[in-house]
Image (cartoon, rainbow, N blue to C red):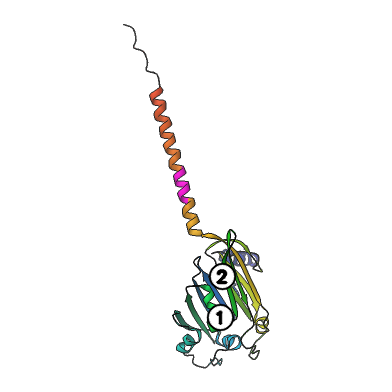
Amino acid sequence: MRVLLLAIVCAAAIGCGGVFKPEYEYEEELYLALDRSATLNVYASVASLVALRGATLDPDRRARIDPDGVRRFFGAPAVPVSVSLSRRDGRRFVNVSVQVDDVRQLARIAPFAWSSYRFDRRGDVLEFRQTVGPPAEAAADGDWTGSELVAFRVHLPSEVVFHNAPSGEVERGNILAWEQSLADRLAGRPVEIQVHLEPTSILVRTLLLFGATAVAALATLAAAIWWISRRGRQRPTAAPAPR
């Protein structure tokens, strides 16, 4: 019975795409479009924002966090920012979403200035590169356990031709992930992100494939109808029986 229960739990974890997904202290999730526009979502503990990005927030779990203050910290002229707050294990976390017309604009926004971004055509593919540099202030102070993780995820709009994600795999939904320990992030060890993409979106490629298949099917049907009608016209007429 125990073996059966263990097998069921393992199957559920695999089938659900990772029931036991790691919990991150700081996570950036970048949604990239082929026209270079992007949405960057950040899910981070208040303590990690203070330590990594120098946010002027009170890391005390009992402190009240002002959403407007968080919005000002992540804000920039003409850049839409949405903010929500949550708790995990009694600790305060911040959820932020930032939208830009060009992914390279993110480097001009203070909380994301530790990264450089490139998204350009390289031969027959599009190349996206992001280098995450050291924190603004390497404030190692904090009630850290040493097990905290940081993640950078990228949602890609077209087929991935090449990438350097440590897992070597493209996750379901065309997602790539780079993980790092919080200790390494505080120490300023860089994260190098490199991806080569097809220049046509997955949706467009699917529609083109569907259209080509439909045209081929219609052409085959038309040819079959033509062949049958031609055979009918060429069939000899039986001679009348003699009287």
Question: Which labelled disc corresponds to residue 122?
Answer: none
Residue 186 to residue 99: above or below: below
243 to the left or right of 108 = left
For the point 54% across and 84% down, the residue is: 110
Residue 139 to residue 25: above or below: below
108 to the left or right of 193 = left
On-image quarter of the N terminus: bottom right
Question: Which residue carries the number 1 mark?
Answer: 112
Question: Which residue carries the number 2 mark?
Answer: 154
Residue 111 to residue 225: above or below: below
Residue 190, visible in the rendered structure: yes
For the point 57% across and 86% down, the residue is: 49
Magenta stretch, overall SS: helix
* Residue interval drawn in magenta: 210-216
Helix, strand or loop status at disc 2: strand
Kind of residue at badge 2: Val
